[in-house]
Amino acid sequence: MTSVIDRLTELRKVCPALSSSSQQARNALLLEIARGLEKDKENIFKANEQDLENAKDLSPAVRCRLKFNEDKLMGVTGSLRDVAALEDPVGKVLMREELDNGLLLEKISVPIGVIGMIFEARPDALVQIASLCLKSGNCLVLKGGKEACLTNRALYESIVRSSSNQGFGGWIELLETHEDVAAMLKAEGLIDLLIPRGSNAFVRYVMQNTTIPVLGHADGLCTMYIDRDADLSKAVTCALDAKTNYPGACNSIENMLVHRDIAPSFIPLMVRAFEKAGVTVLGDEECRQFAPCTPAADEDWDTEYLDLKISIKVVSSVEEAASFIARHTSHHTDAIITEDHEAERYFMEHVDSACVFCNCSTRFADGFRFGLGAEVGISTSKIHARGPVGLEGLMTTRFLLDGDAHIAGTYMGKDARPFTHRMLAAEGASQILKG
């Protein structure tokens, strides 16, 4: 059997061909993959049914993420076509500068190389990351959750068939065992960036057991603050969507903060709406004065439920709300509901999260909804990429310098020639690569 390291070595060899391929070829393959998935859908659905049967003892949240049906298929094929329509990120000129007569410097965007994706039981994530890696010219090695192993295999085999049909071979690999994860973590030099998506404990395990750069987020502990100047109808609408639209998503809210001035009128209204939607409400002592609910314990403010459950706390000001979020945040997505622009400005300036929203649901924290075509995940890091990570997060840069027998010594010493350092318009394709 071929070892993981041997497979990654072969994958690495494909990088130059993929990174230098034309956008027309990559776009054609994205469209072919969409058609292939539609053609292979019965095999994919059959595999998913077996995965769901094997996972019948797991939580509803896990089974919801695991399900791959017509709606999920429509979503991923639509995403593939959307990604194909996006501007090509490869070779984009980010800066162009004349250092001196005949000495031209360009900074261009280039693929990172090999992306390693370790993700939870969400088969649609496999297609999303594959589409973005292909569009951005990156090779990809995937390791999905064991709960989705049959669905992942069916999706992967469909993508491989479509790739072969278009003359693209070997740019994607699927790993399937627990031992494969350990091999991936040790594959420095073969994998350039790891993107883990899973539990807090798992993401931290990856970060602590590899020397490969890691991009991602551990928790999605999101909070919505209802300000004293909130429109209560808007607040109920936004909060219900943020909690019930997809409770298992990392951008659903787990905590709600309510300004004391509106608590007597808003909390009964909100609790009734939550309970009608099947949401279990936990509240602090002050919250429970206005509506019956389960007492919230200290640990609840730091719990990502990923379920129809929410904790509510009463606060005295937007400042206290921001302070609370600072203590209990995962830096993912937080929102304020208010008609007061000053409160909105304070919240957006003082809440240090990747996404900060006003008067809308936190569920908008999504690469597709941001117009990125798809996303590889949401990063809470402050280095390289933050928030929903689309194509730009899978690119790095390269400096190109083109001269005519220019040497550094000309610009050194007593008679040093000065640089012109003239900035030029960074438009169109690379002038250096065009020749």
Image: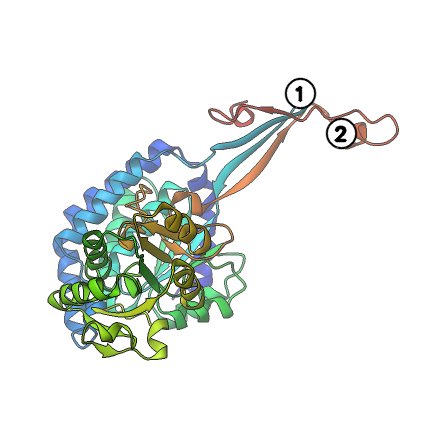
Dot 1: few (<14), some (14–19), or many (≥20) neighbours within 10 Å? few
**Residue 39 visible in the displayed image:** yes
| Quadrant placement of the N terminus | bottom left
Going 23% across and 75% down the picture, which residue do you hit?
289
Q: Nearer the viewer, residue 370 or 293?
A: 293
Going 13% across and 65% down the picture, which residue do you hit?
277
SS at circle 2:
loop
**Residue 64 visible in the displayed image:** no
In the image, residue 195 above or below residue 275: above
Query: What kind of residue is marked 1?
Result: Gly
| Quadrant placement of the C terminus | top right
In the image, residue 33 above or below residue 220: above
Q: Nearer the viewer, residue 412 or 257?
A: 257
| Percent x, y of residue 374 | 31, 47
Q: Nearer the viewer, residue 286 or 362?
A: 286
Residue designated by label 2: 407
Residue designated by label 1: 102
| Percent x, y of residue 239 | 23, 58
Please, which residue is most extreme toward the right here?
Answer: 414
